[in-house]
Image (spheres, rainbow, N blue to C red):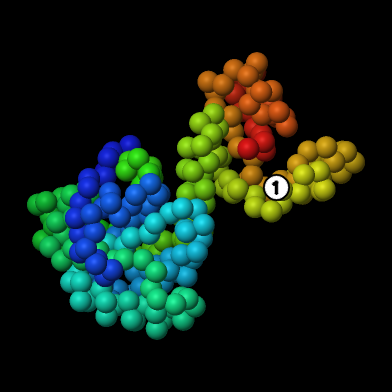
C-alpha cells in the first residue's frame, strides 16, 4: 500500500469484539501492525513491548490495533502467553487483535497478494506496520522480516515526527531527530553539548537542545517569511555549493 492511500473502512472480529474501522478509529491516529501467525516468538515480544508502552501511544492520541492471520480463539490464548512472558504489562491487555484466519484483510490492506495468500511460506511476509492519520490515509509503512523484531522507540519517534510535521507544514525532521523532551523546555538555562564543543565560551543565548532536536525548514519557505514563522531564530548552513538550502530551527 502506497503512502497517501486511503485505508478502506473494513469490518473485523477482534479480541475486544467486532469493529468497523472508521467508527473504531474516530479522529485518532492509528498504529496497525500485522503478524503471520500466533504463538511465534518474535511477534510475542513485539505485542508485549507495544502493550507495555500503551501509555505512550495514548499520550500521543494514537490507537493501537494488531492483526494476525489466525483464529480469534488462538489470539485470546496467545494474549495469556504474552502477559505471562511480559510481566510488566499493566492490567488488562490494552489493545485489540484482529482475527484474519483466511488472510482476506491482509489482501485488502495490500500486505499479501490474493494469489499468494494460501502459500504458507509467502504468508510469513505478512509483517507490515502502518501508521494511519485521522484522515484515514497511510502516513508511514514499515515492512519487517520474521527474523527482525520491531523497535517501539522508533515507532514512537516517527509518530512524533508525523504529528509535528502535520501540524507545522513548513518543516521536516532530519536523520536521528527526536523531539527533545524536557531539555527543549529549559529556555536559556544551559547550552547543548554540540554547541559547547563548537564554542565553549559562546554566550547562552539559545534554547537548550539535545542532539537531533533541530528541524529543517522546507526549501519553499521564503527567507523573508522566516522571522514571522520562527521568531526565536533560524540557523543557515553555508555549503561548498554556495546554495543555501539547509536552514534549521529549534523554534517549534
Q: Is residue 155 left or right of residue 136?
A: right
Position of residue 58 relative to residue 8, above or below, is: below
Position of residue 8 relative to residue 122, above or below, is: above
How many dots with numbers?
1
Position of residue 142 relative to residue 236, above or below, is: below
Q: Is residue 25 left or right of residue 207?
A: left
Q: Which image quadrant: the N terminus?
A: top left
Q: Is residue 203 left or right of residue 163?
A: right
Q: Which image quadrant: the C terminus?
A: top right
Q: Residue at x 20, y 59 (%)?
A: 12
Q: Quadrant of residue 40?
A: bottom left
Residue 89: % across, % down = 46, 75
Position of residue 230 relative to residue 189, above or below, is: above
Regarding mark 1 in the picture, which secondary structure is present there? helix
Give the residue number, with chain letter if any, for mark 1.
184
Q: Is residue 59 left or right of residue 6?
A: right
Front-lying residue, 21 or 193: 21
Query: Badge 1: how crowded within 10 Å, few (<14), some, or many (20+)?
Result: some
Front-lying residue, 127 or 108: 108
Q: Quadrant of residue 148?
A: bottom left
Residue 163: % across, % down = 49, 43
Q: Residue at x 41, y 61 (%)?
A: 150
Residue 116: % across, % down = 12, 55
Is residue 112 visible in this depiction of the protein? no
Is residue 109 visible in this depiction of the protein? yes
Q: Residue at x 47, y 70 (%)?
A: 52
Q: Quadrant of residue 50?
A: bottom left
Q: Residue at x 18, y 49 (%)?
A: 108
Residue 231: % across, % down = 71, 28
Q: Residue furthest right?
A: 201
Front-lying residue, 227 or 195: 227
Amino acid at each position: 500500500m502506497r503512502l497517501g492511500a486511503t485505508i478502506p473502512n473494513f469490518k473485523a472480529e477482534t479480541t475486544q469484539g467486532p469493529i468497523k474501522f472508521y467508527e473504531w478509529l474516530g479522529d485518532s491516529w492509528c498504529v496497525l501492525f500485522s503478524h503471520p501467525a500466533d504463538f511465534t516468538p518474535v511477534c510475542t515480544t513485539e505485542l508485549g513491548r507495544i502493550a507495555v508502552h500503551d501509555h505512550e501511544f495514548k499520550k500521543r492520541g494514537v490507537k493501537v490495533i494488531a492483526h494476525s492471520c489466525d483464529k480469534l480463539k488462538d489470539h485470546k490464548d496467545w494474549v495469556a502467553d504474552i502477559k505471562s512472558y511480559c510481566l510488566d504489562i499493566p492490567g488488562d491487555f490494552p489493545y485489540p487483535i484482529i482475527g484474519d484466519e483466511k488472510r482476506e484483510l491482509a489482501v485488502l490492506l495490500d500486505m499479501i497478494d490474493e494469489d499468494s495468500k494460501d502459500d504458507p511460506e509467502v504468508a510469513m511476509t505478512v509483517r507490515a506496520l502502518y501508521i494511519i492519520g485521522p484522515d484515514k490515509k497511510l502516513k508511514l509503512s514499515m515492512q519487517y522480516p520474521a527474523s527482525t523484531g520491531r523497535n517501539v522507540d522508533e515507532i514512537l519517534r516517527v509518530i512524533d515526527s508525523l504529528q509535528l510535521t502535520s501540524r507545522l507544514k513548513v518543516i521536516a525532521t532530519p536523520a536521528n531527530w527526536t523531539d527533545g523532551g524536557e531539555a527543549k523546555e529549559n529556555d536559556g538555562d544551559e547550552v547543548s553539548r554540540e554547541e559547547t564543543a563548537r564554542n565553549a565560551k559562546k554566550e547562552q543565548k539559545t534554547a537548550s537542545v539535545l542532539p537531533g532536536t533541530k528541524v529543517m525548514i522546507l526549501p519553499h519557505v521564503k527567507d523573508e517569511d522566516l522571522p514571522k514563522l520562527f521568531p526565536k531564530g533560524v540557523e543557515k548552513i553555508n555549503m561548498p555549493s554556495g546554495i543555501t538550502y539547509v536552514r534549521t530551527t529549534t523554534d517549534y
